[in-house]
Amino acid sequence: MIAEAGLAALWFAGALAALQLVMAAIGIARDRDDVAAAVRPVAIVQGLLALLAMALLIELFLDSDMSVKLVVENSHSAKPWLYKFAGAWGNHEGSMLLWVTILGLAGGAVAIFERSLPERTLTATLGAQATIALGFYAFLLFSSNPFARLNPSAPDGLGLNPLLQDPGLAFHPPTLYTGYVGLSVAFSFAVGALVTRDVGPAFAKAMRPWVLIAWIFLTLGITAGSYWAYYELGWGGWWFWDPVENASLMPWLAATALLHSVTVLATRDGLRAWTIMLAVVAFSMSMIGTFLVRSGILTSVHAFAVDPERGAFILALLAIYIGGALALFAARIGTVRAGTTFDPVSREGGLVANNLLLSVILGIVLIGTLYPIVAASFDVQLSVGPPFFNKAAGPIALLLVAVMAVGPLLRWRRDDAKAVLRRVILPIGATLAAAIALLFVWPGVLPWAGLSLAAGLAVASVAPLRKRNLRRTPLFTYGMVIAHLGIAVSLAGMASDRAFTQETLVAVRTGEPARVGPYTVTLDGISPVIGQNWSALEARLTATRGASERILRPQLRFFANPPTSTNESAILTVLDGQLYTVLGQPDGQGRWQLRLWWKPFVTLIWFGGVLVALGGMLSLLGRVRRERRTTMRNQWA
Amino acid sequence: MKAKHQRLTLALLALGAVVVAGLLAMSALKDQAAFFYAPSDVRRDGLPLGRAVRLGGMVEGGSVKRAADGITVHFVVTDGQATTPVVFAGIVPDLFREKSGVVAEGQFQPNGSFVASNLLAKHDEKYMPPEMAGKMHETKTLEPDAKQ
């Protein structure tokens, strides 16, 4: 019954999305305010129905209902509770349902909370949101039904890919999806504003919190995904330039550009067409990301199903939405008047530079990601990996960091180049000092530039607080300071990891020590361990550094359903870095392979990512608070 | 500056940025893309020396040998028509085994052997890298010709 109820909820939600679209169209085209007024409640109910369907699917997984095909193919009754719960979206159909659920809820949230946008633009926005939802409901119902039954039912399930059996599964996909789908809201806002010819500061102010929310979630999702890959894969790397990683990075790059340009539009009424374009690009990137990940065109833990029909379906949706939005953009952009002008040396100028550089990086990542797919259709098989991305995008990213250091120190509209120079003397000094100091330990060109610029950026990012009354400084200024500081911290971590990581690969007997960085690691012994749905060989390692002695327990884990083994790394986190240990295979003569890394300050990478997200949250809080205060003042006046 | 001129300037800048991205990407792609080879491709096209490539095929049965250091592994990759000896120092992936598919990243040596810096095996029992599936398929259809 639960499966049928879930399917029914999904059909109803799809029907309501269609209704929402039609009502919004009538409301706008015929100027029927009574019809338009009903769009909000429909959007809310549609979101709730999608949520109900998701909840019912989770219930099926928790029950281990083996008459449901999806549960049989992706779950097992002996699986721990958390992975039954999160396993509901650890597969193609379930993850698409999660996508649609978040999309529906985002539309509902706009309907409930958005009060500053003119009613007509809001109606158009919800209409656009319904259009997107409709495509994905059709995708679920016609080609990816999560509630399909199996007849006769199976005795038990096939289990979940062990690489996914990790607490990260409960957190990473919903976070990232909220970010992806949050960009659909920005997209719908842009479409709504184009439809009603309402592109201006008021629209930008209304759109900004939604962009911020999406961006915060994307930042957190990427940070979490990076750390998950780092400790789960046992390869010691935190970013592999895997197409699936790029699929999450590209929307983030576009959203970062959008976040900055929407600020120009909101505060200075500039960059109107550009902001609209970026909103379209940002959502296109999350659609491309969804296509890459969900079409089965790539192989990774993320690609659950290889089904050409599904890939074609998503590709068609992509073409319709992006093509439609671009056509609307082309048709309406003539009616969008150019905004106010500004000097090249100004905050706006800095933000334009930020946007251009982000676009270049985005372009490089996009080309590098799509090139192998395009080549494959010409029967050429190749892969594009870290050397390409580091070489092509690395220098641009460092240039962007330099712009980021200077930008916040510029005044709006017009600034004096000499005065700017006086303001950036301190950051430049910090950069040079770091650069000279690093010459003595020469870490290689890119890390050298990265560490030096990180020092400069760290100083520059707190500089906007200088000579200000700290208690009266608005919260969103703190947000910017902390987000930029987070980038500096993260960059320092990346450069340090790349430059100073030490790796040791040995085969050792019990009691035989191995050295890596400041640590001496000794294998004390190997013992079997039993988990809830796995068994493992666990090594006991003693890591000594001076007087301190710590125990690490990396494992070789064996899963029965499906039959797979995984390396569970053991990581020792200390203030100045991480000791990362992986247990390999026995060599048949009483020795065990150990792979050890000493990674100085590697944790800064994710700490910086969290700081960036925190900056976003402070900024959001500051904006919302100020907005509320202005609304209240207007009501009293 | 007039509003119209500024808009034009910005549009040109954006266009320029896209072109720069394209050029940068293309020039880097030329020497950084790792092409995919099967052992018989090498026999036909010659050795791709001095650049990172991927070598794919099956691990030949009985070919996996561990060196005395306990770290280095020697094995032979085959696609049914030709073979390439591979040497790899490191922890082999969980699903690396004989008569099973593998993709090795690394460089060919002048003597025709392959030094791998990284091995990719299938993620789980169901999964096979698409490059490999493609190569296997191709090899199979070519087999009748090879016998003639």
Image (cartoon, rainbow, N blue to C red):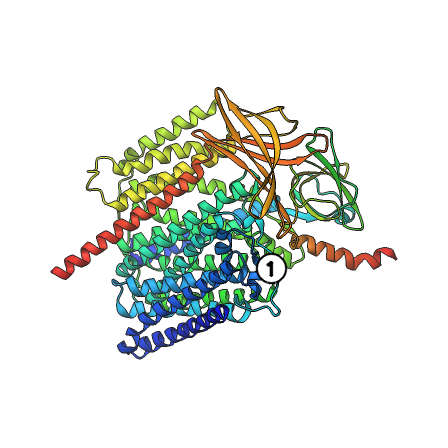
The foreground one among A173 and A238 is A173
> Which quarter of the picture shows residue B70?
top right
Residue depicted at 43% across the width and 34% down the height? A492
Q: How far across and down, in percent of the image, does residue A41 sit?
A: 31, 71
Regarding mark 1 in the picture, which secondary structure is present there? loop
Q: Is residue A149 above or below residue A428?
A: below
Task: Please give left or right for residue A321 compared with residue A306 in the image.
Answer: left
Number of other residues with Cα within 10 Å of mark 1, as a class: few under 14, some 14 to 19, many 20 or more: some
Residue depicted at 30% across the width and 44% down the height? A479
Q: Is residue B53 above or below residue A523?
A: below
Chain label for disc 1: A
The foreground one among B81 and A258 is B81
Q: Quadrant of the C terminus of chain A?
A: bottom left
Q: How far across and down, in percent of the image, does residue A325 sit?
A: 42, 66
The foreground one among A323 and B146 is B146
Task: Please give left or right for residue B14 compared with residue A508 in the image.
Answer: left
Question: Which residue is label 1 attached to?
Answer: A156
Q: Is residue A73 above or below residue A589?
A: below
Q: Of all residues shown, which one is farthest toward the left?
A: A637
The foreground one among A424 and A580 is A580
Q: Can residue A330 be seen?
A: yes
Q: How far across and down, in percent of the image, does residue B51 sit?
A: 66, 40
Q: Can residue A271 be seen?
A: no
> Which quarter of the picture shows residue B88?
top right
Q: Amino acid at mark 1?
A: Asp
Q: Of all residues shown, which one is farthest toward the top?
A: A547
Task: Please give left or right for residue A46 compared with residue B38 in the image.
Answer: left
Q: How far across and down, in percent of the image, does residue A436 sit?
A: 43, 25
Residue depicted at 53% across the width and 26% down the height? A543
Residue depicted at 46% across the width and 71% down the height? A5
Q: How many marks?
A: 1
